[in-house]
Amino acid sequence: MLQRVRAFFQPSYGLLTWTLASIMALLVVTNVVESEWVEGFERMRIVALGGLIVAALFARWQALPAFIAHVLSLFMGLAWAIRFVPLDPRLDGQVDRWTDLLIRGIAAIRAAKTGERIEDYYLFSLAGLLLAWIFAYSSIWLLLRWRWNWRLVMLNGSLLMANLTYAIPKPIASFWLFLLVALLFLVTQTYAQRQHTWDAGFLEQQEWLSLRYLWAGVLACFSLVLMAALMPANITNAQLRIFGENLSRPIDFFLPDNGAQRADRGPQGVGNVVVPNGNGANFANNTVQLGGARSATNEVVLEVKAPAAEYWRSNAWDLYNGKGWQNTTGDIAWQVRRTSTRREALTPINPDDTLTQIDTNGREPFTQTIKLMQTRGDQQLPAATSPLTWSVPVLVQHTFIISDSETTLPNFGDSAIYFNQGPANRDFEYSVVSLISNVDKQSLRNASTDYPVWLQRYLQLPDSQAMRNIGGLSRQLTTAAGAETAYDKAVALENYLRQMPYDDQIPAPPADADPIENFLFNLRRGYCDYFAGSMVLMLRAQGIPARWVQGYATGDYDADRQVYIVRDSIAHSWPEVYFMGYGWIRFEPTPAGYVTVPIRPDGPPQAEDNSENPDDIGPNAGQVQQPATDFDALQDLRENYQTTPIPTVEPQALPVDDAAPPIVERSPFWRWLAIICAIIGMVILLLWGLLQREFRGLRPAARAYGFIGLLARWAGLEQRPERTPQEFASELAKEMPGQRRTLRRLADAYTAEQYGSHVRLDPEEIENDRAMVSRTLWPRSISRGWRSILKQILRPRWRR
């Protein structure tokens, strides 16, 4: 039994090596699975495990040619992957499953030949499972047949880092486990190389040396990973952020559902890549994670010809997950319409078709002509809020409602994104007629709070202590302002937030913190994403429907050309609050210089006869007539949308008197400095304990002589076996002339203690001599150790 245990811990290319390499590969696959790219990828692990086992058997079968092994493995992997593709449950037999996928494959080939986009989820799932098999099989084959070690770790690590770069959310746990296992794997391979050298020189090795070496490696690797995990992860340098954003852009080209087809995460594609907020001519379609410093350029992204200043909305977000925002509008539409792809759930709108809106009181038509100055990879077309008509074909992402007559009715008042049906290239130009708000304050105060069912999702809040703290702060502020109506509460929160300083170079929030709570209670400075998100959550905590919106602020007006110049630097986010009868109303809590706060009259204006010129709203009035409204459809919508009230959502009570926590100023620098110092102290204590254990039980002279010999070896002055203690002391004295007498005394004391009889030695004098020599050897040992580590890193020894 002991022989089997010793054989397992021999770090050659055996069971231990295969186990560590297999765990590495499985952790990479697990990292992909936890990224939740598509449904069905959770079966990757069992498929990869099959590839690991087959690779070990084939690689050890030396008589099996590589080409035959690879072909057999490919067929076995295909059969194994098809076994786990989530096809229709009615396809019980393997023949049926193969036939179904074959038909899908033929259809995909034909679609590719005609230039159509392939959106078959099952083929994509099969490809992912087969790639997991190939990756696992290749890892073990390269290890056992080609003797890859460092390169295998780099291959696995590169794939894992590539996945982490684009994954939202970041599966950090599997990353740290991979790092620990990869270090242990390198430790075992380093020992295997040393063991090969010892065996070649016929050197005798201590019993259980490999197990002791492995145990020391476990301690060292765990300490390194722990230190790395406790290091601060915030990146505040704007240039590093720009580099990361530029690195993320190429992924859009390879995604199977780019642009409008990337409207949702789910079985139809992997469209959860987050384009940086307000970066260039791109916004995300379905997921935004709140982060640290914001980077932007001064490039022009839009030129807008419009009669007045407005904001140019691009997309809207409804679900807050505690780390950022998600757009679930497309997912809801896909579930209602039950289309085969999410793209088909988007509603195509032809030029001059009217998008029937609800709650249009206090609004007027607003015509704008927008020219794209950069190609938009997201295919989103920004426009003023509540578009009625478009001059170009668009795809609208919106929700639906099922009427009493089982008719599916579009709710264009709940639209999130407007996509161009074709490419949104540079110099693309389009015109939009929108219904912008000109409602007065008193009308908004009098608006009903009997919200329809479809607004329920704009009251969503995570069930967390952070949300309860935010809700408590919201109620404190509105109570102090004496606000009773939804409008007055929104104004009170807006005014409070505008008192905080604007700062677009803030550090990223801690990994375990809610970014909005961290902004409100700790950081208390930030940029538009945090101001807008805070107002949305505080309004929802009081049962007021609100959503987080992205787009662009007004821009600079060029009087000569009569256009607004919109730059990347004013990419913006703001809250929209829903008022019954008046629709989505913009507020502006961000105290930045490029924003404009909405100005509303105190009360409704006196009625005027504008029948002769109903569209007189600016210098470009009259160019596009207000489109006719389908009043029958509008009435049908209102009957189904507005007659079903929902109860007001009350946030959970705070544990202590409904009070928000006090604002505490923290100092991350000193906190992390203390942690780093504590870790360094722990490492030093650990090393000191190991040294004391090494020389435990020895007599004073032997302990001092052994300690000096260890430091000398670390410093590159190792004692040769044929030299006597006096000769070794003379060699050291050549490097340390000032310690010649001390070294001689230590050598004589060691010789007398080992070979003399009835010799009395002074332990205190021996300890003083050891300390004097140690102070000279320590700096040289540390210096040589760092040089050796850097040499190993910069010049790794590749081995086949």
Image (spheres, rainbow, N blue to C red):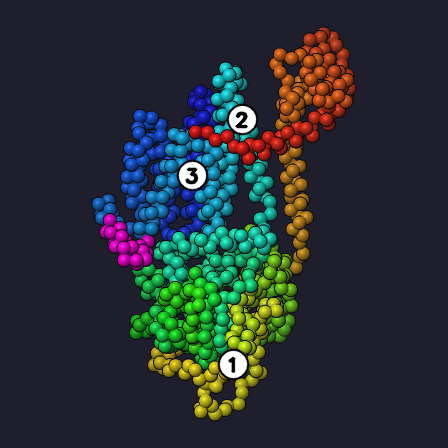
Q: Is residue 290 left or right of residue 411?
A: right
Q: Position of residue 738 (x, y in %)?
A: 77, 22
- Say if residue 684 shows up in the picture: yes
Question: Which amino acid lies under the numbered mark 3 shown in the image of this protein?
Answer: Ala
- Residue at mark 1: 439
Q: Position of residue 90 (x, y in %)?
A: 24, 51
Question: Which amino acid lies under the numbered mark 1 shown in the image of this protein?
Answer: Val
- Residue at mark 2: 213
Quadrant of the rendered image containing residue 504: bottom right
**Start and end of the magenta stretch?**
102-121
Q: Is residue 37 left or right of residue 82?
A: right
Q: Is residue 603 above or below residue 734?
A: below
Residue positioned 45% across, 89% down in the render: 613
- State which quarter of the image contains the C terminus: top left
Residue positioned 59% across, 30% down in the render: 788
Instruction: Tell me if mark 1 has few (under 14), some (14-19) or many (20+) residues whose alpha carbon lies within 10 angstroms of its own.
Output: many
* Residue sitting nearer the eye, 322 or 245: 245
Mark 2 and mark 1: span between their CA atoms? Answer: 76 Å
Precedes in sequence: disc 2 or disc 3: 3
